[in-house]
Image (spheres, grey):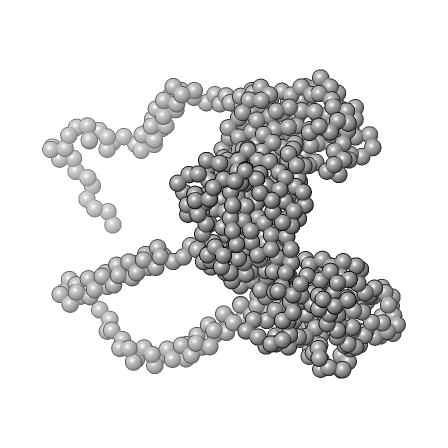
Amino acid sequence: MGRTVRAAGWLRQNRWALVIVAVLLPATLAITFSSAWQGYFNERPSRPVDVAVGETVEYADAGWRIEGTERFDSASLVGTERDLPSGTELLVVTVAVDPHAESEPGDAAACTARLEESGNAVTRSWAAVAANPVSLDGSGPEQKSCSTTATAPYSFEAEFVVPADAGRDGTLTLGVSVLAELPRYARFALD
Amino acid sequence: MTNPLRWRHAGNGLLLVGILTVAGLVLHSAPDRDLQQSAIPVQGALGESASGRNIRATVHSVAVTESVTAGNGWAGTTPGIWVVADVTVEAVVDDQGATLGTAVLRIGDLVYTASTRPQTATVAGRGLATGIPLTGPLMFEVPADVVSSATSGSSTIELAVASDPRVDSLLVVPVDLAELPAQPAIEVDFPEWDAR
Amino acid sequence: MTGPALQHTPRMPRARALFDRVPTRWLVASGSGILLAASAVFGGLNDAEPVEPPHLEVGEAHSGLEMDVTVNGGVLIDAFPEVNLIPDDGNRLFVVRATVENTTTAARRLSSTEPDPIQVDGVPEVAAGQAPTRILVIDDGSDLVVVQPGVPVELAFIWEIPADALAAGDTVAISVLDRVYIGEGELTYGGLYGDPAVSATVDLELTDVGAGVTE
């Protein structure tokens, strides 16, 4: 019958194989899961390009800048005109877009604007009025989102219906994302 | 066989049986797919607000009635009886794809979904806004004998954001239908947004 | 290595010795023959008779595993303007009225994309098994039909047909389908019902209500 190999001897004999397994096993797991993980995050706006107040950012073949932000509460003139529900406010952000001359009319892509409140315990986000279930009276601004046909600089006004306490305890940022540029998206600080 | 060898073989056999037993126990008690994907229940109470990941709701009151008139004029008939709940619901974090997809009355084994026959006059299926509560009625068509049966005392109203409530918060509010008198007719208001 | 050949000792019974000598293939063949002969008692290799689904009258209820269906009548109508159901020029609507009651424990949704409990046969321009154009609740005309357990609801199954395909007095064969519970959905939530099979037939005589809107 064979001699039983003692533990210390077995470890020493196989030490290199064990080292290689210790390196390869986690590496295999990481590589296998990372493709799914990255695939998920690459499909949605997950890498912000932060823009400070007043700065212009180059994104999706155009220059973007926040021109101004306005808030109207439900008791104001605008609030009663648009029939804002009580306790909510209408936040309007004017964004100036400078499409670069290379893009032909019809080439520019559509964008999605979302308002985000961060810094609190939970991060909240809102979709623009067109995609929001709260329906307002009146038609609002003419240009509510990016134009796909403009070649000259233009500006659009993104409207959001938010509760009155939005931004009180956290910071509000506007996120603009274009499908072709995902996962990168432009995140503007609002003053 | 020599004595020490026999003991070693017996020891190996016992080890094998032990490993098999442990494996059997682990397999038996591991959560199956239903448990892995089940909704995460959040217990609520009548009149109190309950908060899940992306839904916060309060069931203010429940009534049992033979006919109900909704805020848009709809007055549907049913061969059973109506259970009408007044709820306030809002999205907490995100309004992307947030609708009141699951609004269910569970009486014992039976599961009734909130009627969408009143169209926009009911909160069921309506889109939810982040931080802006929507208050309105939910109407359930239930056979009259089920409402007066013994199990209706421990029925629950369950609310969730998507029509598939798995792997997300499910607000569970117990209601006692047995103690509610059957009213002949009630009127309910049109759903309203109010963030005061 | 083989052991010593089996010795037939004087103590072994004769039958056993005989049994050991019979080649195996004879045993297998005779066993199969006996089983086939036994099956002749139950019909042997004849074709099984298909079971005819029962034939019901209009107004007679049929209980199924998923739903109880009662066919109440059928009409031809021009249009349902109040629910915005107006057929193309030259077409009319063929409506089958049926009361459906859910016999399962959870609410079920009926839509034109899922196999329906009612199918029509023998209508020109409507393929056998074609889904209805719309399914509406007769009481208030609502479109999204969800049948709650134990609550019967009268529904209108509507097909759009050419105006001259059917006339008053024609008879249409209606098949009532039933489905069985297959299991809990994996990708979808809730129970899955499948395997629709014709479980009853009804012959429906049509009336023509022109443009009447009393439904």
Task: Tell me the quadrant of the picture where the N terminus of chain B can be found.
Answer: bottom left
Task: Tell me the quadrant of the picture where the C terminus of chain B can be found.
Answer: bottom right
The quarter of the displayed image where residue A117 is located: bottom right
Say if B117 sits above or below A65 in the image. above
Q: At 32% from the left edge and 77% from the top edge, which residue is drawn? A: A10
Say if C118 sits above or below A9 in the image. above
- Whether residue C123 sits left or right of residue A120 in the image: it is right
Residue A96 lies, in percent from the top left, at 81, 74
Residue A78 lies, in percent from the top left, at 77, 66
**Extreme residue toward the left, this view:** C11
Say if B4 sits above or below A50 in the image. above
Q: At 75% from the left edge and 75% from the top edge, which residue is drawn? A: A69
The quarter of the displayed image where residue A31 is located: bottom right
Residue B81 lies, in percent from the top left, at 53, 38
| Callout count | 0
Say if C215 sits above or below B34 in the image. above
Of B178 and A135, nearer the camera is B178
Q: At 50% from the left edge and 36% from the top edge, which residue is drawn? A: B143
- Whether residue B196 sits left or right of residue B177 in the image: it is right
**Extreme residue toward the top, this view:** C169
Q: Is residue A29 visible?
A: yes
Residue B13 lies, in percent from the top left, at 23, 60
Q: Is residue C187 visible?
A: no
Of A75 and A110, nearer the camera is A75
Of B180 and B160, nearer the camera is B180
Of C39 and C210, nearer the camera is C210
Q: At 47% from the left edge and 21% from the top edge, which residue is drawn? A: C46
